[in-house]
Amino acid sequence: MTQISPPISPTQRAADWLARFEAAAAARDADAATALFDDECYWRDLVSFTWNIRTFESRDDIRAMLAARLNDVQPSAFKVEGDATEAGGVTEAWFTFETAVSRGRGLLRLKGDRAWTFLTTMVELKGHEEKKGPRRIKGAEHGVQRGRQTWLEKRQHEQATLGYSEQPNTLIIGGGQGGIGLAARLRRLGVSTIVIEKNARAGDSWRNRYKSLCLHDPVWYDHMPYLPFPDDWPVFCPKDKVGDWLESYTKIMELNYWASTLAEKARWDEEKQEWEVRVVREGQPVTLRPKQLVFALGVSGYPNVPKITGAETFEGTQHHSSKHPGGAAWAGKNCVVLGSNNSAHDICADLWENGANVTMLQRSSTHIAPSDSLMELALGGLYSEAAVAGGISADKADLIFASVPYKIMHTFHIPVYEEMKRRDADLYARLEKAGFMLDFGEDGSGLFMKYLRRGSGYYIDVGPSELVANGRVKLKSGVNIERINPKSVTLSDGSELPADLIVYATGYGSMNGWLADLISPEVADKVGKVWGLGSSTTKDPGPWEGELRNMWKPTQVPHLWFHGGNLHQSRHYSQFLSLQLKARQAGLKTPVYELAPAHHKR
Amino acid sequence: MTQISPPISPTQRAADWLARFEAAAAARDADAATALFDDECYWRDLVSFTWNIRTFESRDDIRAMLAARLNDVQPSAFKVEGDATEAGGVTEAWFTFETAVSRGRGLLRLKGDRAWTFLTTMVELKGHEEKKGPRRIKGAEHGVQRGRQTWLEKRQHEQATLGYSEQPNTLIIGGGQGGIGLAARLRRLGVSTIVIEKNARAGDSWRNRYKSLCLHDPVWYDHMPYLPFPDDWPVFCPKDKVGDWLESYTKIMELNYWASTLAEKARWDEEKQEWEVRVVREGQPVTLRPKQLVFALGVSGYPNVPKITGAETFEGTQHHSSKHPGGAAWAGKNCVVLGSNNSAHDICADLWENGANVTMLQRSSTHIAPSDSLMELALGGLYSEAAVAGGISADKADLIFASVPYKIMHTFHIPVYEEMKRRDADLYARLEKAGFMLDFGEDGSGLFMKYLRRGSGYYIDVGPSELVANGRVKLKSGVNIERINPKSVTLSDGSELPADLIVYATGYGSMNGWLADLISPEVADKVGKVWGLGSSTTKDPGPWEGELRNMWKPTQVPHLWFHGGNLHQSRHYSQFLSLQLKARQAGLKTPVYELAPAHHKR
């Protein structure tokens, strides 16, 4: 009699794999656990196994990590979450798990019965869970007690003492969305934190930008932690609305947010094992002594302003794009914008809309990604109204996003941009006809890979490319400014343009430029280059790192951290950075597995 | 051959009923539609069928309404939403439907194949939907256009002109949670609105209360529309935190919120068909000309301060509970609190905690509901962490709540309070031993029915009852203050109490006391009593109304509306009031079915 087994369900297949993995881990058998991975395999760990952010890209690397870490991590309680799915021979399953000190969530992709990609992420530290949902505090302290302090009194006391008679555990320098979101997470974890921000109000880093600016990423991608935007927010949010949101958010989240505060100098006090940071708060010097120092100054450092011969003789106005207030004053005037990336395009369009005579100077090729195409082709599956309707919250989308190993990420992106080339062929053809130098990244992998590798070289088009294509914004490409004259600029091709305004849309320096000034050049060099994957493409030299350099993870300088990125990254990675900081504040052992070396100075 | 039909599923039973109902409605056959209802039947309509808030409590009433309204309403597209359930012989099903001008949602309960309760609610007006989710605006206006206005410029223009060169469609008097939530809904519906508030900042109506105050209802019950509290908010939120939330909420929702603004006089301009309202904004007179006027001043009117012989001779401090700042100044002093409801208890406890010698004067019996018991026994099924985990959002809970007809609501509540009597027997026994006069409502239906009927007569105990029971707060019950002397009060039993402070925790007058002063006593009388069901219990004279008098629905005075209630009611009913106002602004026909007469002056 022949018995036919029923086909195994995707959920059962995933559960079987996790059970085998758990058994091997319980036996501390790194070989057996490693044997469950496919020939091509990737394990990305966000803090759970490594107290680091690491992607292991081979069985050898996985085996080495497990051999080093299993005794300490003690992974257990692996459990498939919901139903696994199967498509194209790949089984995909969400799962939860525990370690000795934490609870985690992960995403597993199997090819056959072996793991292709494996994502493990830390969700919470046992005994240090956020007091949310069923754990929320009661608030009213029922019963009666003499001398009780109200919420307001406690809050006022904290605001009066923190930074003065009490010291914060963590100091975050930079109060944009990155610093704010991280501080909100640390607040929930009970890590006392001060955020300092040079501007007068939370949100000013957005308000101060050129007035036509809207977010270039769609709303579903941009939520802050804990408090999603209301469901009527526009797809592309105007900058001032984002600014106002951030200001309300700092209040709602009860952050210790010091506006109008500048960091002047910081040094690690080896004896006291704490930082000494001199800041000036609303004109008054204050010395802060945090245990941890986080730089949350965005992806970028200081504005790049090129030194050009004759600049000091210019009789018009010249400023970096970050200082550009908007085009209202420039109707009928001659404006030259140096650069051809995001800010350059938006500023050219704003000037043109205000009636200026505008010329864009393109120095090197630029990747143009029309916003609608980008939304539909690249982001729509994870961050869109359809995704939300399909049950993919921003948090879930973030994890799916995080589960794709950087090593092969470009292979998922190349077809998207092939499709974009077809879909937007007309625009691209007309741009090229107008002389615009286009690219799609060195391997054709487009915008997001350029962003990860070098943080520049692209424009998400929300309309202005049409102005370049149709010549309303004049274009000179393959040129630079050779010399600045009192009323004009002379270009590298020898031509001369009359100029009342020069805008340097020339980007920003490395993030750790700030670090060299605030702490020391030596410390900045020790940290090394921040951002980039080591892809051996332009502005992202090898060796391959597998993760963004120095972001959200321990650096070569203890107690010094970098936080930033776009709204999506700030939201997602602040979770892992906050857990690392909490673990240290709580005195947990946090042995970092394979701290990344610094291959490049700054 | 015998055929056995499979048992019909609850979902199928509900779908069958809705199909029969829809067919009868399509045939404009009121008799056939009415025949689908059980002998005991209730149909509650929130605006969809009646442009009113009405409960029909018999087949005759239902038949009459259908006969009058079917031609106009044209109900259609009834569809069961999700799976129906069955328990105790009652089938319960969510459904959606349409009318000629709107989309709606409802909840049906069948006994057998006939309807026992039927709830129909308006969700949105066709062609006037909120621009949310898939309808959200793009925000960035892609493409380029000369002279475009940014979000900030539009907002600044609106703030500068609305109320001056432009007139709002709706003026809301009162900027507490009620006015704020309604304004947020009207904003989404494109109804231009100004909210005026006498205090300096949104949220001050909470901040200004006694300092120990926390919400007496749990957090799940208290969300504002559109933007739920973060999931780490305490169960019972401290007043200042609520105040700060409301302030951030007005900003996030982009309300035209005029703080420090008093309404002085209003009159209906018959000729221009608009109100003329004189207000003083930050000291400057402004005349507003809205089409609709909403009173959102809470459930209550002016503070009740009893006139007591000798009050003017008192050498200590005397004030109404609404003016009580907290007990810090009263350590070691003799304090007399007149009253025994919510504020009286909280103020007595606060004074005791601050070291005062406190006596509570109880004039008549009070219903005491321990907060924990109330949460677990009365609210937990709909508003709790467990309910949220079970998929019952606040919005869904509100609809379930709304589906219970007021006529039989007490029958659901009586067993809850029977259980509370058992559960908290010890506290109740000790309170009675201390001389406290307890009640559970005239029919034993407890707190919420008292709230609906008279808005007073109860205390949600968060601890202070223990102080009364154990005598730390002294109690004199069955007495009133007969006479006030320079340093004492003489009670109605002839005894005398030394007094440095007298707090009048004596409640508030009728909501339309404001109305008499702002418009005229005649208009206040025409509107008649506000709040209460006509239950023929204390302070709620008959005849039976079936709905709260004048709340959230058309009144006897056209273009004049009342909004208020607790956070739950403000959230839920603001939906229906906003849709009524939108329909009028959009010029839709809104024939009100059976406008409620005013049986009582004020």
Image (cartoon, coloured by chain):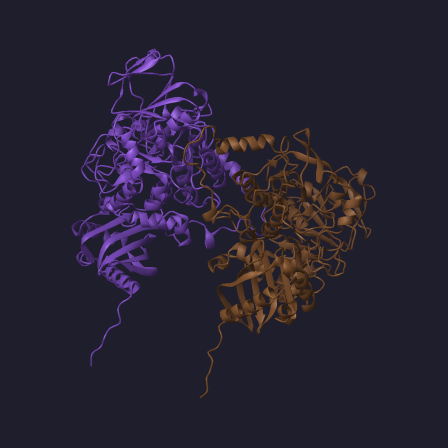
Chain colours: A purple, B brown
Inspect this view and state whether residue A585 appears: no
- Where residue A34 sits: x, y (%)? 19, 56
- Farthest residue to the bottom: give it: B1
Q: How many marks?
A: 0
Inspect this view and state whether residue A348 appears: yes
- In the rendered structure, the answer to whether residue B273 lies left or right of residue A155 reads right
- In the rendered structure, the answer to whether residue A36 lies left or right of residue B168 reads left
Residue at point 49%, 31% (across, down): B149
Residue at point 68%, 49% (across, down): B299
Taking depth in this image into account, of A556 and A505 the one nearest to the observer is A505
- Where residue B581 sits: x, y (%)? 63, 47
- State the quadrant of the C terminus of chain A: top left
- Where residue A70 sits: x, y (%)? 23, 53
- In the rendered structure, the answer to whether residue B16 lies left or right of residue B310 reads left
- Where residue A145 sits: x, y (%)? 58, 48
Taking depth in this image into account, of B428 and A246 the one nearest to the observer is A246
Rendered image quadrant of residue B536: bottom right
